[in-house]
Each structure stands twice: as C-alpha cells, then as structure tokens.
Amino acid sequence: MPPARLRPHILAGLGALALVLCLYMFWLRDSSLVRVEHVSISGLADSSRLRERLAQEAGTMTTLHVDHESLENVLAGYPAVERLAVDADLPHTLRIDVIERQPAAYLVSGRSRMPVAADGRLLRGLAGGAPLPEIKLSGALPRERLGPGATLRRAEAAGAAPPALRRRLSTVTETRDRGLVARLRKGPDVVLGDTRRLGAKWLAAARVLADGGSRGASYVDVRLPERPVAGGLPVQETAPAPAPETASPAPAAPAPAVPSTTAPAAPTNP
C-alpha cells in the first residue's frame, strides 16, 4: 500500500488519464481535425460504381474512427470482392485495398460466360480476360453459386491448381473410371480422381511436368500423389544389338604326305 503522501499524486494521475481518454473517445476521434478527406482505393480491376460508393462511405469517417462494418456492408452487392484491407494515415487519408476473389474457371452456358470461384460462388462484376479453363453447363447459369455436384467438384479442382498451371488448363471433366481429369493446352491430361488432397495432387503433377522425362506423355496420374505416373509415353525403338564377334576358325592343317605303299612288281621268269 503506497504511503499516504503519494496517494493524492496517484489519484491525480488517474484522473488526468481518465480525462484524456474521455477527450479521445467523445471528441478527438470524431473531430474534424482527423476527418477523412482523401481516400485511396487500390485492387479494383473494373468497378467505378463500387469505387464511388467506398469513397462516399469513407468520407463520413475519421482516421481515428474507421467503421469497418459500414465499409464491408458496401460489398454486399459485389460477390467478386472477398474483403477489404483498410489503413488510416493521419490526419486525413484513408487507404483501402480491395482483395478480389480469384476465379477458378469460366462457367459457359450457351453464349453466357461467367467466372466462378473454387467454392462455387459466381463472380459477377469481375473483369474477365484471364486464360482460365471452361466448364460447360447443360442448363442455365445459377444466380449466385453452384450447388453440390459434379460442376462444383470441377470448379474446386480447377481452383486448387497453381496459377501457372491453371492458365494452361483448357477444361476439367469427370469420367466414371478416372474421376476428375484436367486437360492441359498442348500438354497431357492430369488425372486427379476425387477432390481429396487436391493441393498435394497438383504439387505432384507440377513436379512430373517439370521433369524432362515426362515429355510426350499423354497423361499424368496423380490419384496417389506419393506415386505419380506419367503414362502414354512414346515407345522408343532401339536397333538390335550386333551379334558378338567370334574368332574365325583357323585353317585346317594340311594332311601329312602319305608315303607310297605300292608293292614292287614281281620278277618275271626268264
């Protein structure tokens, strides 16, 4: 317990601190001294309307009192935006970085073409143009997101691909015997099977494709990512090995001359 003579000083210090906090909470943080006058917005590919609405909402705030919930509410009609990163720069500047969802593929229905995220959310308002795989639908585009089923699995498989490989994909299909199959432009098919461990499967596929020994393969099977298989490689015909050389046989030795054994003629009687 502090000595009695120190108690007034402690109480005075606490009172001063409380006064400063009250001034901050009820006056300074909402004061015109720190009112937002400049709004910097980055990360938006193409949405002047959203940019305008964010700037308008930010102009009602101060750099000491940023209402994040109000800014997030502006995004309600823009499913292509995932979140905002907001940074206040005293005294009058607010920086807003818009983080957009990454498209996994394009859904194609007739003449309609819409980017879709890996979770099946349709990214309306997102600028197109990036090379992405196409997933063709037999019916119309859904309003907001894909329901459970084969199309959602195909979008999930495409979205799990590394960006460098995703740009090379032409489409993702699903067959009864091989499951999910991603088709590469000017490259082999990547057989994924199901949606389990997609990250590990794509990593295994990237390693196989980077190996020069897989050049010419028609497919890369990564259903077991620990044991990827490059199949359909062209068979290299090899010339038959030459027969081993054998020593030519030595010439036969000439037969020894056989002395004549003709008996002398018998003497004739006179």
Image: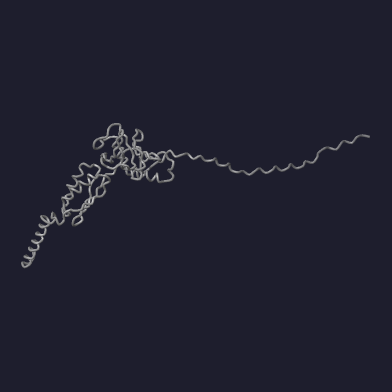
The percent coordinates of residue 176 (x first, y second) are 34, 33
For the image shown, how many numbered marks are present on the structure?
0
Residue that appears at 58% across and 43% down: 244
Residue that appears at 71% across and 43% down: 253
Quarter of the image for residue 121 reads top left
The percent coordinates of residue 186 (x first, y second) are 40, 40
Residue that appears at 43% across and 45% down: 212
State which quarter of the image contains the N terminus. Answer: bottom left
The percent coordinates of residue 173 (x first, y second) are 34, 36
As drawn, 258 above or below 28 = above
Q: Is residue 156 left or right of residue 255?
A: left
What colour-coding does the image apply? one colour
State which quarter of the image contains the C terminus. Answer: top right
Which of these two is toward me, 27 or 176?
A: 27
Quarter of the image for residue 179 reads top left
Name the residue furthest bottom.
Answer: 5
Which of these two is toward me, 71 or 16?
A: 71
Residue that appears at 38% across and 42% down: 228
The percent coordinates of residue 103 (x first, y second) are 29, 42
Name the residue furthest top.
Answer: 139
